[in-house]
Amino acid sequence: MTRLEDRQILVRDIEQACADGARLAPACAVAGIDAHTLRRWKAGDGLLQGDRRPDADRPIPAHALSEAEQAQIIAVANEPRFAETPPARIVPALADEGIYIASESSFHRVMRAHGQMNRRGRAQPPRTSRPPTTHIASRPGDIWCWDVTFLPAQIQGRWFYLYLILDLYSRKIVGFEVHDTDSADHAAHLARRTALAEGVHAKPVRPVLHGDNGATLKATTVLAMLHWLGIKPSYSRPRVSDDNAFAEALFRTAKYRPEFPLKGFVDLDSARQWAARFVQWYNQEHRHSGIRYVTPAQRHAGQDGPVLAARHAVYQDARQRNPQRWSGSTRNWKPVGAVTLNPERDIIIRAATSQIQLSGSIGEPAFPSRSGSAQAAERNAGDGRSRATRSHAQRALSRASMARLASTGPSPQ
């Protein structure tokens, strides 16, 4: 419904736009109403009394429930046997006894009118769940992710266990061990050894160690070790499978490597040798797609910026030599900024860190598009428009915006 004051404002602005030469239908469309609505307002007293629906006289239907029937509904709903039963179950139970009083919706309506539409029994109203807490890594050592995965042995029913700690920011594997048992002591030892190797004791801010809700990673032995190291534990939300997605993706990469034995490992030593070779390849040779195809070791050491800048220069040189092959910007070789543990909005990442700008990769291209390519120039520059949702009161048109409609043609006589 549109308030009386808003109707008067809209009609005045539409009439002014039509007087300036705009057509009626486009002016009404910009105002957010239909031309038939405007005619209805003017034909009656819609511009004097406003919308009369809230004060309309609505007679009670002849087939409505009587006061006696409403009282019977309340009495039945308050019987001891139905004290903890909602109307959705009361109505079928009465039907099984050959009794029909009213429909389920009528039960709800009458009980709501008598102030009894509350959750029955011990049921509580649903609570608004808070948004998931997330951790943001803006440099190496801010957040670690760890998990345990199975490595098959050649003997059926036997497994080896790969314990692994990943740096979220750089994707570097900072600690790993392989054992023949799944034990909290092994996890605590790995956390201690990794903390010493990464010099956690000398850092002003200790890392956050995120894992799933497995018993091994939540054991008292592990928690005591993390407390002693000053590392804050973090765990996945219940029944949320992608809260530790970075570690799971790493395990997928490991088990789909060509050298991963399909028939399993012969013994524990062979599993440990394979794990050592994989970690060496992953950290030093693997160009990770999530960090602009630099190696985790390069990003961990802060060398990704010069490497990506050199790639950007190569692309700019290629564009200079063959400008007709480039209709837009070159490939984005901007270093990846902050990394969030859980999926979050980009605004949180932008607020957490400032990202390096490489000309030609984003924004204005370092080499302008070839002449005559209007579409390419439009893609480079962007239209710069923004949209907003407005209510009827906020859609009261300014005279300047209405005047622009005059260019569409004269008003019909």
Image (spheres, rainbow, N blue to C red):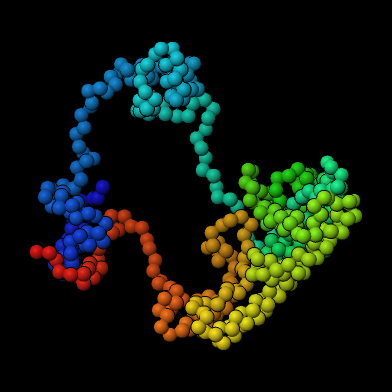
Q: Residue furthest bottom?
A: 321
Query: Is residue 6 or residue 177 the one in the foreground?
Result: 177
Along the viewing direction, whichever of 380 and 93 lies nearer the viewer: 380
Compared with 178, 368 (above or below) is below
Location of residue 144 (image quadrant): bottom right
Quadrant hosting residue 114: top left
**Would residue 41 appear left or right of 178 to someone viewing this image?**
left
Q: Position of residue 244 (x, y in %)?
A: 67, 52
Compared to residue 347, the image places residue 48 above or below, namely: above
Location of residue 190 in the rendering, given as x and y in whole percent from the top left corner: 82, 55
Q: Name the spot of residue 348 as percent of width and height, x first.
A: 55, 61
Residue located 86% across and 47% down the image = 154
Instruction: Pick whichever, 299 or 218, lies toward us.
Output: 299
Split into 4 quadrants, where in the image is the C terminus? bottom left
In the image, is 384 to the left or to the right of 33?
A: right
Q: Residue at x 52, y 77 (%)?
A: 329
Residue 390 visible in the shown view: yes
Residue at the image point whose x is 15% and y is 53% from the top: 39
Coordinates of residue 289 in the picture (x, y in percent) = 65, 66
Q: Quadrant of residue 27?
A: bottom left
In the displayed structure image, the side of residue 86 where residue 330 appears, left or right: right
| Above or below 134: residue 183 | above
Residue shown at 12% from the left, 64% from the top:
412
Q: Nearer the viewer, residue 56 or 154?
A: 154
Residue that lies at the very extreme toward the top in this rendered image: 97
Q: Is residue 145 visible?
A: no
